[in-house]
Image (tube, rainbow, N blue to C red):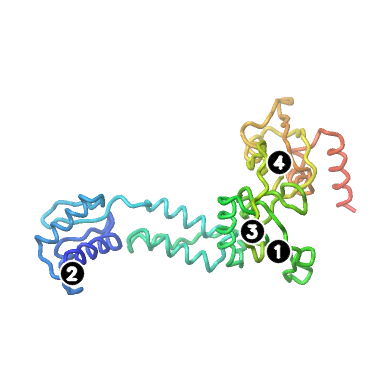
Amino acid sequence: MQNKSRLLYILNLLYHESDEDHSITITQILERLQQAKIESNRRTVAHDLKVLADNGFDVVCNKSRQNQYFIGDRQFELPELKLLVDAVQASKFISTKKSKVLIDKLSALTSVHQSDELNRQLYVDKQVKSNNEAIYYTVDLLHSAINTKKQVEFKYYEYNQHKKKVYKHNGKVYVFSPYGLMWNNDSYYVIGYCKSHDKIIKFRVDRIAHPKISQAPSVPQPDDFNIAEYSRTVFQMFEDETHEVVLECRNTLMKTIIDRFGDDVETEPAGKEHFKATVTASTSNTFFGWVFSFGGDMRIIAPQEVKERYHTIIKSSLK
């Protein structure tokens, strides 16, 4: 029992207090074991270090007058942890409270010396964090429903003019068959078939209230349904009538078109300074606003009905 306690203590010491820049000598290990009232000597500690290395732990030894040891390879490298911490801090979807909890857990995956580097000051302009602490349990519940092919039931809320949460349709319970979850524009959405709408739609996960898994089997996902294609079509998560739209864009906007519609988007030159892009998009006001944001460097040239609707909206906004 003493041997097992000593072995675990040494492993914990190396894992949390050593890295490539902070190694530990056998003398230091002996001092810590003595403080913990665990019997040991240089021979037993050296043997324990070998046992750890033989069992897959990357115990690295810098050979010198006093051999120095540290944990080398870890489940996550420090640059990977920094990237994950930045993603957590920048995400609106993750609440401030939960962000701190998650970063503390990520920090525990490296040494105490390197964990200080994870206290990163990443600033995001006008960052707004969610205050819905239940969202993590909702995501878990939705994944369970997807895996077991069950329907879910929930209420859905929005905000009124007084910034108060109110249930849509007077607290109506939605019956929903979830097919998948998608993160778009820093918000989490669940996509699936809604019984009352009689079609595939999406809901923002952070606005779902009182979800529960039903015992009823979900409505099967259509064989030809593709979530990635759906997300591309439902432009910026605002649904409207879908059209194949031809855009004429200045050449400098090619990267913007590819970022938005993918590198397989259909394009062709349109003179020396412009190109045409044929895209499938939900022609909502959000789409029109996106086109307008390029200040004339992008314009809709077909179909005529979409072009006319765009011009009508622009004119009405100037009144």
Task: Decide which of tag 4 and tag 1 comes sooner along the chain.
Answer: 1
* Real-space Cα separation, disc 3 to disc 2, in angstroms: 54 Å
150 with respect to 163 (left or right):
left
- Disc number for residue 33: 2
- Mark whose residue sits in front, 2 or 1: 1
- What SS does tag 3 mark? strand
Dot placed on the residue nearer the N-terminal end, 2 or 1: 2
Type of amino acid under label 4: Thr
**How far is disc 4 from disc 2 in space, using C-alphas?**
62 Å
Q: Secondary structure at mark 1?
A: strand
Q: Which mark is residue 233?
A: 4
Q: Secondary structure at mark 4?
A: helix
Above or below, comparing residue 209 to residue 197 in the picture: below
**Which percent across, then down, holds residue 53?**
21, 51
Q: Which mark lies nearer to you, 3 or 2? A: 3
* Mark 4 closeness class: few <14, some 14–19, many ≥20 residues within 10 Å: many
What is the spatial separation of the Cα atoms under label 4 and label 1, in whole angstroms? Answer: 26 Å
Q: Earlier in the sequence, mark 3 or mark 1?
A: 1
State the residue at coordinates (71%, 45%).
Answer: 235
Which amino acid is tagged 1? Lys
- Tell me residue 135's x, y (percent): 59, 63
Q: Which of the two labelled residues, at mark 4 and mark 2, occupies the earlier sequence position? A: 2
How far separated are the C-alphas under marks 3 and 1?
Answer: 14 Å
- As measured in the structure, the alpha-carbon distance from the residue carrying label 4 to the one carrying label 3 is 30 Å
- Given this view, does label 4 or label 1 mark the residue nearer the observer? 1
* Residues under numbered marks 4 and 1 in contact, where contact means CB atoms less than 8 Å apart: no
Where is residue 312, by image quadrant?
top right
Q: Which residue is mark 1?
A: 155
Counting residues from the start of the chain, the first of labels 4 and 3 encountered is 3
Do the residues bearing badges 4 and 3 touch, measured as CB atoms within 8 Å?
no
According to the picture, the residue beneath numbered tag 3 turns out to be 214
Q: Element type at marker 2?
A: helix
